[in-house]
């Protein structure tokens, strides 16, 4: 049942359910269960719920990715960064979180899954600095969109995309970015009845 949910969901999102990639998602789930026995990484343990709420939800934003350097801010247990890195091995992903145990898990999973395109960084976003900057920055369940954008803006390339994954339409949060060029897109996550939206802010050229 779970295998069918995963392969059909991946196909629905316009991605190829390659056996190698599907196998890595299954290994990720087993690793999460193993670490959850010691560390409280996520409340989502049921495999079907894991596939829908973590994997397919993460992959649903893939059409909005831009460039070859992507930062996942507040990655937690590696979502959306790890599923995206599995399906897009040609893109470089940096997964950042301020909680050490979560970054240790991400590093271990990247090693076990052979994800050479993943780097895990234990740092607060305000204190993180790197060059070159990122083409796309993603946040999911991190903070309100205005706070997330302004705290990570120093890491975004001019013309780059900032993507904030949200549930219900965040009308109040949008007031904080009213003067910035942005758009809101509804997302469809296979098997998920709850609302999902993506807020996209484009960093003006010349900043």
Image (cartoon, rainbow, N blue to C red):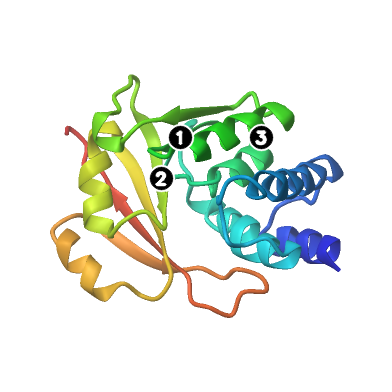
182 relative position to 54: left or right = left
Front one among 147 and 181? 147
Mark 2 nearby-residue class (10 Å; few <14, some 14–19, many ≥20): many
Residue that label 1 marks: 100
User: Which quadrant: the C terminus?
Assistant: top left
Residue that label 3 marks: 109
Q: Earlier in the sequence, mark 3 or mark 2?
A: 2
Q: Give the secondary structure at mark 3.
A: helix
Q: Earlier in the sequence, mark 1 or mark 3?
A: 1
Q: CA distance from mark 1 to mark 3?
A: 14 Å
Residue that label 2 marks: 74
Residue at 26% in and 75% down: 171
Reply above or below: 180 against 138: below
Residue 92 screen position, x and y as percent:
53, 29
Q: Is residue 91 visible?
A: no
Contact, CB < 8 Å: mark 3 with mark 2? no
């Amino acid at each position: 049942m779970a295998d069918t949910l995963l392969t059909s969901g991946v196909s629905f999102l316009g991605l190829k359910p390659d056996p190698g990639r599907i196998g890595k998602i299954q290994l990720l789930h087993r690793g999460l269960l193993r670490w959850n026995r010691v560390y409280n990484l996520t409340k989502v343990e049921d495999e079907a719920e894991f596939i829908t709420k973590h994997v397919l939800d993460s992959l649903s934003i893939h059409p909005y990715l831009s460039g070859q350097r992507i930062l996942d801010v507040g990655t937690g247990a590696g979502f959306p960064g790890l599923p995206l890195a599995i399906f897009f091995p040609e893109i470089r992903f940096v997964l950042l979180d301020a909680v050490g145990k979560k970054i240790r898990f991400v590093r271990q999973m990247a090693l076990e899954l052979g994800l050479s395109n993943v780097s895990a960084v234990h740092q607060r976003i305000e204190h993180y600095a790197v060059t070159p900057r990122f083409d796309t920055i993603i946040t999911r369940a991190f903070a309100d969109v205005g706070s997330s954008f302004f705290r990570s803006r120093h890491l975004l390339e001019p013309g780059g995309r900032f993507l904030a994954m949200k549930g219900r339409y965040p009308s109040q949060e949008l007031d904080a970015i009213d003067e910035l060029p942005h758009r809101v897109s509804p997302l469809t996550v296979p098997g998920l009845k709850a609302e999902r939206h993506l807020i996209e802010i484009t960093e003006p050229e010349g900043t």
